[in-house]
Amino acid sequence: MAHRLRPEVGQWYGHLDKGQKFEVVAYDPDERVVEVQYFDGAVEEYELEEWFELDIEAVAEPENWTGPLDDVEPDDLEDRGSDLDPEDLDAEASEFRTTPGVRVPRAPEEPPSEEDEEGGESE
């Protein structure tokens, strides 16, 4: 059954005959090629003419996005937070902050003086 759905990168579609869901991950109108990735991670490429012959419909993005990932346990997806204190990170980062668009000049390295090289002091 032909359809009139244009391929949209990031849009999910479902095969009406197979029940498989897939996302359009690339579309090249010049080459007339559509690249899709199925929920299980498999990637397939269709000529644009083939695309319009597919028995598909637009569907919502799957809630469980782990389909293409191997061996992901539900516990792996939990937000465990961080042991880092945000104030510590902010304090360390403050020394690197600059005003946007302002270039901070670096101090030129001075060559060691003769006294430094000899280890003596000036009198």
Image (spheres, rainbow, N blue to C red):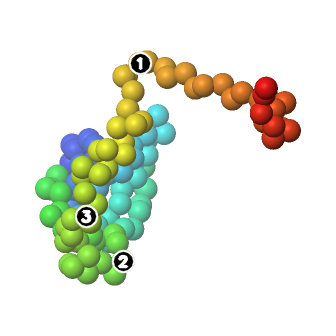
Residue receiving disc 2? 70
Residue receiving disc 1? 101
Disc number for residue 4: none
Disc 3 marks which amino acid?
Ser
The crowding category of the residue bearing disc 2, from other C-alpha atoms within 10 Å (few below 14, some 14 to 19, many at least 20), is: few
* The one of 27 and 17 positioned closer to us in this rendering: 27
SS of the residue at dot 3? loop
Give the residue drawn at x 29%, y 55%.
23
From where the camera sits, is residue 104 visible? yes
Give the Cα separation between the discs numbered 2 and 1.
44 Å
From where the camera sits, is residue 48 visible? no
For the N terminus, the quadrant is: bottom left
If you read the primary sequence from the N terminus, does the residue marked by circle 2 or circle 1 appear first? 2
If you read the primary sequence from the N terminus, does the residue marked by circle 3 or circle 2 appear first? 2
Give the residue drawn at x 86%, y 38%.
118
If you read the primary sequence from the N terminus, does the residue marked by circle 1 or circle 3 appear first? 3
Give the Cα separation between the discs numbered 3 and 2.
25 Å
